[in-house]
Image (cartoon, helix red, strand yellow):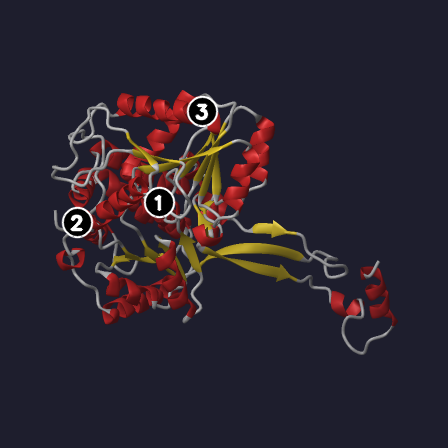
Amino acid sequence: MAELNPAATQTEASLEQMQNLLERQKQSYLAEGQVSAEVRHDRLERAANLLINNADRLVEAMSSDFGHRSEQQSMFTDVAASIGPLRHAQKHLKGWMKSEKRKAGPFPLNLLGAKARIDYQPLGVVGVISPWNFPVNLTFTPLAGILAAGNRCMIKPSEFTPDTSQAMAELIAEVFDETEIGVLTGGAQTGADFTSLAFDHLLFTGATSVAKHVMRAAAENLVPVTLELGGKSPVVIGRSSNIQKTADAIMAGKMMNAGQICLAPDYVFVPEDRVDDFVSATQQSVAKMFPTLLDNPDYTSVVNQRHYERLQGYIEEAKASGTRVVEVNPANEDFRQQPHHKIAPTLVIDPDDSLQVMQDEIFGPVMPIKSYSKVQETIDYVNEHPRPLGLYYFGEDNEEQSKVLNHTTSGGVTVNDVVMHVAQEDLPFGGVGPSGMGSYHGVDGFKTFSHAKSVFTQTKVNVAELAGLRPPYGEKIMKTIRGQMR
């Protein structure tokens, strides 16, 4: 199962082509002037209709890129889940666009009718670099905020899902003028050239290691960036949790997209006296959801040979170190001969931190389990490592829950489930530190892709002169100063 060279199957956009499109988008944006609510609503409508009318083609493309990908999962996570944010933006658009009143001050500048407000203005042209794991969702969900804010957009989708990238490029070109939204396909060089462009904002979703190069390139043009990254998102299972319900939720999240999710539970803390119970519960959970795996249409393949070998390497290293490894394989299927890159969910029990599975973001159906005696141990461990994109707590002990949440820092949290905070359109989604910078979704996305312009309107009366704030200075200004220094 040799890995194809993805860049060879799609058009490589040149730096000159990208620079030309950026200049045309900027000129078109400036010529348009103020972007009305009606224009923004129409662009959101066209994006939503594109997904609705071409869902089958996009699902087929994603399955082709993955070798096998659950059609229902693609329809749910990539198509339907992208339409929701676009509709949410349409519903709230006019409210988001309203000027925000602020209090004028300080005294005496706030006298006699002076006013202060914030106007949310489009940034201009936003660049988007989207990843391969949810190639449609992580292209169209950001468009909700970008288009609602009145911007133009240039998109560089992943070369590792070439069929999906090509489909999106063709479909977007059918319903959007290139000066509204343009898609540039290609490989690593195209991506590097894309990051060097003088956008008004750049959104990158992908690996932390790549984000460093993206941020460095963006800095050359002082382009502000939003980085949606990942990291090792931990799960803390409290003693008050229902182990079977907990395992059901965790394995549903871990096995969705075969664990190829930036928010997937990466490793799980289990009370030391309940580890075997949890292992047994995960086996029951998997058997209930996936009685078989190899030919099961609901179970997605690892995206390519390179990632398949990487994940197998984690498992083999753990076995070689003497670590207990449990393959959860309900039908005892032989995964050595298969047309795809499927891997049975695999538990690695109490691995040493020196193992690669505890160093890297796993991004696959391999899950370490770490035992603990006191919950403080889990807090200390999380705080000793880079801040994760997500953190999950299971249990009914509110005091313990508060302790875990208040003494750790992560991009977001889901309690008694995993991943689902990302589905809340009214909550900002983003990381912190190594797991990301900035956030979007809902009104927070609108604000991320807008310039919050401060506007102060002075009264017709010359307050500054009346208060002695202009030379020649005298007792009036001293009175004002004494008032401010109380």
Amino acid type at circle 1 is Val
Q: Where does residue 47 sit, x and y in percent of width and height?
A: 29, 46
The label nearer to you, 2 versus 3, is 3
Name the residue tied to disc 2.
163
Q: In this view, does 390 lie above or below 203?
A: above
Question: Which label's residue is closer to the chain start, 2 or 1?
Answer: 2
Q: Mark 3 packing: few (<14 Cα in 10 Å), some, or many (20+)?
A: some
Residue at disc 2, secondary structure:
helix
Question: Which label's residue is closer to the chain start, 3 or 1?
Answer: 3
Residue at disc 1, secondary structure:
helix
Residue at disc 3, secondary structure:
helix
Is 320 left, or right, of 226 in this rendering?
left
Q: Name the image quarter holding residue 377.
A: top right
Looking at the rendered image, the quarter that the C terminus falls into is bottom right
Is 128 left, or right, of 119 in this rendering?
left
Name the residue tied to disc 1.
357
Amino acid type at circle 2 is Asp
Q: Where does residue 314 sit, x and y in percent of width and height?
A: 30, 44
Residue at 37% in and 39% down: 264
Q: Where does residue 50 sit, x and y in percent of width and height?
A: 24, 44
Q: How far apart are marks 2 and 3 (CA)?
A: 45 Å
Residue 318 or 376: which is nearer the viewer? 318
Residue 336 visible in image: yes
Residue 60 or 407: which is nearer the viewer? 407
Name the residue tied to disc 3.
274
Residue extending furthest right? 475
Q: How far apart are marks 2 and 1 (CA)?
A: 30 Å
Residue 319 or 463: which is nearer the viewer? 319
Q: In this view, does 483 lie above or below 393?
A: below
Question: Which label's residue is closer to the chain start, 2 or 3?
Answer: 2
Residue at 51% in and 43% down: 381
